[in-house]
Amino acid sequence: MNHKYFADNDRLSNEDIQLFADMQGKWVSENEKKFFETLENKEMHELAPCGDELLLNDENEDGLEIIRNDFSEYEITGSNASTNAVSHGQYCSTLKEALSVNLKNANLLERDITLLDWLRENDYKAINYKRNIAVD
């Protein structure tokens, strides 16, 4: 059975509305443009009640994981492959909040960098937009 779980979000946060407006046309790469345009659409129209796995820890050297929940909540966690230590990370109610998380302060990396800067540094590699369990 092929069904999709879509719904319209009438509660998009003012912070994310402003973020998407501020980023419009100011992309540093085509991958960044795709990231913001895709997540704006997902936050508006694609519910993720079971998690939308945007990045998994075994898909990047730093072991970071980004999961979108519901419409616009984000969970940033990580694990160290060499020690198997898992960080509980950060839970954020908006994308703007998630992108501003300092990964060192959240005990996810040993260097001082925000999630936005980390994504830009990696040119959004390994971000997967097709893992919303509810959408199939």
Image (cartoon, grey):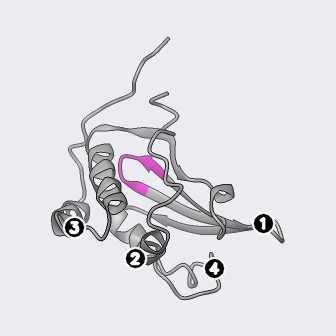
Amino acid found under the numbered disc labelled 2? Ser
Q: Which residue is mark 4?
A: 107
How far apart marks 2 and 3 lie (CA) works out to: 14 Å
Q: CB of mark 4 within 8 Å of CB of mark 3?
A: no
Neighbours of disc 2 within 10 Å: few (<14), some (14-19), many (20+)? some
Amino acid found under the numbered disc labelled 4? Asn
Residue 99 lies, with reference to residue 32, above or below; the image says: below
Q: Which residue is mark 3?
A: 23
Query: How far across and down, in percent of the image, does residue 69 sit?
Result: 46, 48
Q: Which residue is mark 2?
A: 100
Q: Residue furthest right?
A: 83
Which residue is rendered at x = 52% and y = 59% of the image?
75
Which residue is rendered at x = 40% and y = 76% of the image?
100
Q: Is residue 70 magenta?
A: yes
Q: Which residue is mark 1?
A: 81
The span picked out in magenta is: 68-73
How far apart marks 2 and 1 lie (CA) works out to: 24 Å
